Image (cartoon, rainbow, N blue to C red):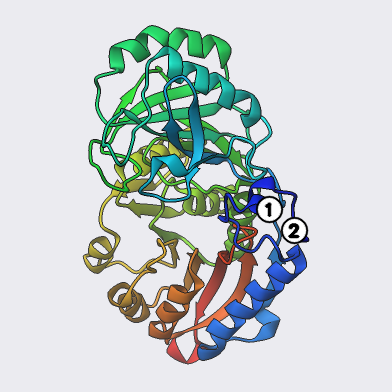
């Protein structure tokens, strides 16, 4: 069997998360491009507007590990469950080739900490135990890490507090450590309550000299090198356009809006940026970035995107949308189509829903489009599209 990368877990059949691992990378990219072109056949699209795809590294490209904890407290297993309802089907993935090489030294320390703090892995069938997941994130900017322990309750908090200094001594790069409390017996990754065990609560990342902050319960791209290219491309696409007022909808930690606002303000253009995102944690991070950049007339708010948009009576020059997999949806797409901002920058992690949204944006044409391979070895990809109002609609 010829694999795109060497993975013993795939060869053994232990893990098939990388469904396309048997396809060489050239074939993976070709099939993604063909899929995107087929989806776009129903909208105004010219091949000359299509830019070459942004490629990814094939290994060590992820900045995050989401590890199911199973086994026993003395010998915990960090990885996945082949059967989501059976803790006995655990596969240890500490040597997954997608993770940063630095994680190799961190996982053994975490396993030792689990034993020292008595964090009994949660048993799904018996509905007993405490520790459900460990979520590990690294910043490519300075290699600092964030560690989150997802627990069923707070009962182990005193033992964790007793052992935390030892963990910090062994892992000085662990700048943010927290407990997330998820009491439900359900396939839910995290709960609402977050207990910080470190004074620092955010992990700093930098893309294109733009500081961005990773915080628990806030979305952040998992492929930082491709994400940096994505944000940088958006910045270059809009820097010479006549833009003064912009909305960044589904803004997350503000990556797109901050990149665009910074390049425009560097050209002495008076801009007004409004970023909207439902997650308060993400808004906290975006606001922190704006303050660090000393950007003027920038405001981030935790609101429902559609409700915010429909309540506005001002027309922005540029609307940035970076929705979840469901897309922006018909009501918002039709509203933007009637509002007619001069430009729409659409970043999508699901080209199928994006293509559907584009059919509602009938007043627009595709000016530029580029595929970003954020998720190698799978069928998934990110796509960035610049839409301009059709000349007959101005």
* Horizontal side, residue 112 vs residue 189: left or right: right
Marks counted in the figure total 2
Q: Which mark is residue 304?
A: none
Along the line of sight, which residue is nearer the eye, 219 or 235? 219
Q: CA distance from mark 2 to mark 1?
A: 9 Å
Q: Residue 98 in the image: state x and y as whole percent.
A: 64, 45
Mark 2 surroundings: few (<14), some (14-19) or many (≥20) residues within 10 A: some
Q: Is residue 16 above or below residue 342?
A: above
- Is any part of residue 52 visible from this angle? no
2 or 1: mark nearer the eye: 1
Q: Which mark is residue 11?
A: 1
Q: Residue 289 in the image: state x and y as whole percent.
A: 47, 38
Q: Secondary structure at mark 1?
A: helix
Along the line of sight, which residue is nearer the eye, 363 or 392? 363
Q: Is residue 8 above or below residue 140?
A: below
In the figure, residue 317 lies in which quadrant? bottom left
Is the C-beta separation of discs 2 and 1 under 8 Å? yes
Q: Residue furthest bottom?
A: 392
Q: Which residue corresponds to the image point at 64% horizontal and 86% vertical from the top-left?
A: 46
Q: Residue 92 in the image: state x and y as whole percent.
A: 55, 37
In the figure, residue 22 lies in which quadrant? bottom right
Q: Which residue corresponds to the image point at 30% horizontal and 66% vertical from the top-left?
A: 314
Along the line of sight, which residue is nearer the eye, 253 or 342? 253
Disc 2 marks which residue? 3
Mark 1 surroundings: few (<14), some (14-19) or many (≥20) residues within 10 A: some
* Horizontal side, residue 378 vs residue 90: left or right: right
* Horizontal side, residue 271 vs residue 63: left or right: left
């Amino acid at each position: 069997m010829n694999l795109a990368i060497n993975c013993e877990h795939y060869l053994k059949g232990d893990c098939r998360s990388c469904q396309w691992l048997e396809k060489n990378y050239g074939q993976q990219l070709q099939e993604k491009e063909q899929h995107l072109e087929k989806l776009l056949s129903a909208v105004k699209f010219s091949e000359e507007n299509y830019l070459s795809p942004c490629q990814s590294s094939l290994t060590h490209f992820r900045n995050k590990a989401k590890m199911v904890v199973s086994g026993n407290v003395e010998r915990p297993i960090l990885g996945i469950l082949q059967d989501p309802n059976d803790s006995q089907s655990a596969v240890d993935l500490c040597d997954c080739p997608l993770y940063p090489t630095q994680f190799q030294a961190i996982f053994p320390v975490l396993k030792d900490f689990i034993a020292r703090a008595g964090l009994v892995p949660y048993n799904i069938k018996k509905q007993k135990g405490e520790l459900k997941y460990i979520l590990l994130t690294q910043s490519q900017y300075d290699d600092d890490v964030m560690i989150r322990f997802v627990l069923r309750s707070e009962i182990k908090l005193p033992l964790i507090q007793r052992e935390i200094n030892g963990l910090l001594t062994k892992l000085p790069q662990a700048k943010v450590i927290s407990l997330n409390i998820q009491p439900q017996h359900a396939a839910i990754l995290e709960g609402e309550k977050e207990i910080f065990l470190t004074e620092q609560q955010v992990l700093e990342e930098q893309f294109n000299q733009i500081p961005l902050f990773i915080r628990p319960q806030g979305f952040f791209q998992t492929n930082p090198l491709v994400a940096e290219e994505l944000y940088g491309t958006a910045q270059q696409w809009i820097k010479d356009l006549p833009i003064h007022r912009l909305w960044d909808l589904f803004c997350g930690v503000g990556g797109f809006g901050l990149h665009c606002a910074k390049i425009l303000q560097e050209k002495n253009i008076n801009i007004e940026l409004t970023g909207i995102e439902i997650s308060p944690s993400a808004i906290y991070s975006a606001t922190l970035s704006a303050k660090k950049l000393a950007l003027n007339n920038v405001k981030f708010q935790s609101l429902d995107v559609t409700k915010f948009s429909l309540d506005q009576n001002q027309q922005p020059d540029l609307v940035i949308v970076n929705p979840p997999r469901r897309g922006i949806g018909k009501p918002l797409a039709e509203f933007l189509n009637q509002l007619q901002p001069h430009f729409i920058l659409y970043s999508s992690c699901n080209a199928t829903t994006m293509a559907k949204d584009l059919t509602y944006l009938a007043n627009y044409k595709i000016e530029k489009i580029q595929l970003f391979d954020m998720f190698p070895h799978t069928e998934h990809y990110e796509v960035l599209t610049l839409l301009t109002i059709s000349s007959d609609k101005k």
